[in-house]
Amino acid sequence: MAEAIRILIADDHPVVREGLFAMLSREPDFEMVGEAKDGVEAVDKAKELSPDIVLMDLRMPELDGVEAIKQIKSARPGTGFIILTTYSDDEYIFRGIEAGARAYLLKDAPRDELFKAIRAVHGGESLIQPVVATKVLDRLTELSRRAPSGDELSERELEVLRLMSKGAANKEIGAQLSIAQSTVKTHITSIFQKLGVNDRTEAVTEALRKGIIHL
């Protein structure tokens, strides 16, 4: 039988800690190793008890959940973090994920979803509630629209892309830039990867949408 998943709960509300502790203790593959009432205690207990998973509230006295995650990750990089909070504000979500949380659940999540998140994070996966995932996708879409255009593409790749937008074939691109056709193909493959596209038309369309090139 596989070793039980060692879990530490960090929350400043005693009733929440006790409820989670009792509920999770009933799962045969979970081992509850401790509780912490604030971020400082969470860091200390994580170092002392070596949990596999830390259930972390965000707003806690002394040290908030995000800073606690950063400190624990620095000391114990293999620890998995699940944020369990009442806050679905965009900034809280992104600060938590950026700090290293692999799952983000609201406290009204069904217990089965919490169990699933613990097992998923312990297995190296991620789990974000649909209501939170929607916010994440909206934020990523906004960031992609605001992102500086073409920063990832090299100057040579931009030259190739501009010629592609004019309908130039690989042979023509190579001739104009004085490079081999094999080199042109390498640049085009790199452009496709960086823009997340599969063909020349998509590459040009995406580059125009992002403002990387202009017709």
Image (cartoon, helix red, strand yellow):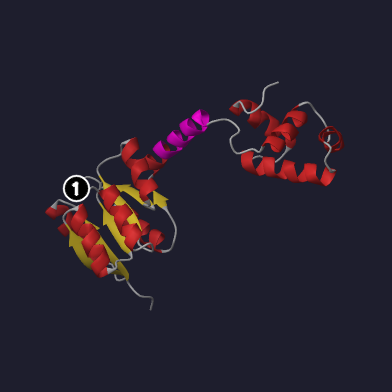
Residue ID at (30%, 58%)? 72
Count the numbered circles shown. Answer: 1
- Indicate left or right for 155 with 174 as reference: left
Q: Where residue 37 sits: x, y (%)?
A: 16, 55
Q: Where residue 99 sits: x, y (%)?
A: 36, 49
- Identify the image quadrant of the C terminus: top right
Under tag 1, what secondary structure?
loop
| Circle 1: residue type | Met
Residue 111 visible from this viewpoint: no
Question: In the image, is residue 143 part of the stretch drawn in magenta?
Answer: yes
Furthest toward the bottom, the residue is 1
Q: Where residue 30 sits: x, y (%)?
A: 29, 68
Furthest toward the left, the residue is 14
Residue ID at (76%, 31%)? 164
- Magenta residue span: 135-147
Residue ID at (14%, 51%)? 13
- Indicate left or right for 148 with 156 as reference: left
Considering only vertical position in the picture, is 136 above or below 8? above
- The quadrant holding residue 166 is top right
Closer to us: 160 or 14: 160
Secondary structure mostly seen in magenta is helix
Question: In the image, is residue 140 part of the stretch drawn in magenta?
Answer: yes
Neighbour tally class for label 1: few under 14, some 14-19, many 20 plus, Cα within 10 Å = some
Residue ID at (64%, 38%)? 153
Q: Which residue is mark 1?
A: 60
